[in-house]
Amino acid sequence: MTLSEPMIVWRPEDDPNIRPPLRGGQVYRPDILNVIEASIDGLNGELRALSLDIHDHPELKFEEKYAHDAYTAFMEKHGFTITKNHHLETAWVATYTHGQGGRVLGINSEMDALPGIGHACGHNLIGISGVAVALAAKAAMERLNIDGKVVLLGTPAEEGGFGKIALYEKGAYDEMDVCLMCHPAPGPRHSISLTSCLALSFITVEYQGHTAHAGLSPWEGQNALDAAVLAYNNISLLRQQIKPTHRVHGVFEGKDWAPNIIPDQVTMQWLVRAPTTLEMEDTRRRVTACFEAAALASGCKVQITITSTLNEITQNKALGAELADIVLKRYGAIDYEWGIKSASTDFGNISYLMPGLHPGFSIPTIPDGGNHTPGFTEAARSEVSHDACLVASKALAAVGMRVLTDEAFCQKVKDTFEEEKKLR
């Protein structure tokens, strides 16, 4: 599918048997891809059961104990060496080594769900995709006597907990030559997306004022709630002057509030997003000025804390080109418009630190039922979504196996990573 063709979102009522036309031609090492496809197809029932089990037991960030145990038991049953509670309580790693030496293929499986709406970002599918890629790589290495190592890392707390960043800082990614994963999202039927995502900054703003009797002597107070409302309105006005690809959104809360007391304390949580980290930092400076202006106008003190920053995903161009070649010849369409391009993820930081690939894959969704909605929770457990996940997993596994078997390609991946670093 090209950008000139209409982009129609895949809906549950659409016939999944209608697929985009394939380009044709031979992929790299079709013998490897044949083993990958046979392996994942053979595991279909087990992977489906695992996905539904995780979906039925949603757990919030850093609480993924059920998922931790389910994934580690599954991987151990399939011949991987397991380390539980790997650096973090609910993180884990499953490894498989064949032969002597060789390169190391890294893969991520996410686990956490969202408050109140469960697996509304499809992490059950992300989790089993990592499992499928790892098991398919193992099958190919065994069948075709390919040296190397597979490292499947179970990463907690993607939803605001920065689990991958913590694991990277503790050395969990050190031996990987590349790292791969994928993510479900709305999009055109049977498409796999190579979009990036938005860089993101988390900001905590605290206004401190002074209480007073709201009726008897309000002039004695400094109203922290007024400061927060001013900041909120300042940013609402600022949005007219920021690019449409940028996002600024926040909430505020207080304690011991009453209508007859001038509020003296407000805490605000804000997120600033933009397509690149540099653009995000520029917009963040303008947002910070809105906070400071509100403090000046209200007479309150303000403390602004940048708590965390997520980078945009840098899709390694060599890895992405290989994925596109496989998908277009064997499976479906490549998309550059959908995926999670307006969301954010801690994998962005990983892609800044090492060669990485994080494609999206489309699943059927209802109108207004995209990621982080109850509609997406239901979409993430459908059989058609499961099948789409396995297709993406086959393509990712094939990319990973080229890293292990083609030294020139692996060097190209690393050279591309270094070149992309210079452009940031």
Image: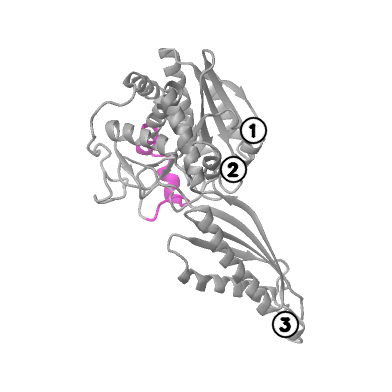
Residue 176 x, y percent position in the rendering: 55, 29
Q: Tell me which label, 3 or 2, sits earlier in the chain.
A: 2
Q: Residue 383: within the magenta? A: yes
Q: Residue 160: within the magenta? A: no
Q: Is residue 73 left or right of residue 3?
A: right
Name the residue carrying label 3.
Answer: 214
Which residues are the magenta region?
Answer: 368-391
Question: Which of the 4 image quadrants contains residue 259?
Answer: bottom right
Q: How would you rate the neighbour count of disc 3 (Cα within 10 Å): few for under 14, some for 14-19, many for 20 or more?
A: some
Q: Secondary structure at mark 2?
A: loop
- At horizontal 76% and vertical 76% (from top left) the residue drawn is 211
Residue 276 or residue 409, whichever sits in front: 409
Name the residue carrying label 1.
Answer: 171
Residue 291 or residue 384, whichever sits in front: 291
Q: Secondary structure at mark 1?
A: loop
Q: Quadrant of the N terminus?
A: top left
Q: Is residue 379 left or right of residue 414?
A: left
Residue 175 x, y percent position in the rendering: 58, 27
Q: Secondary structure at mark 3?
A: loop
Q: Nearer the viewer, mark 1 or mark 2?
A: 1
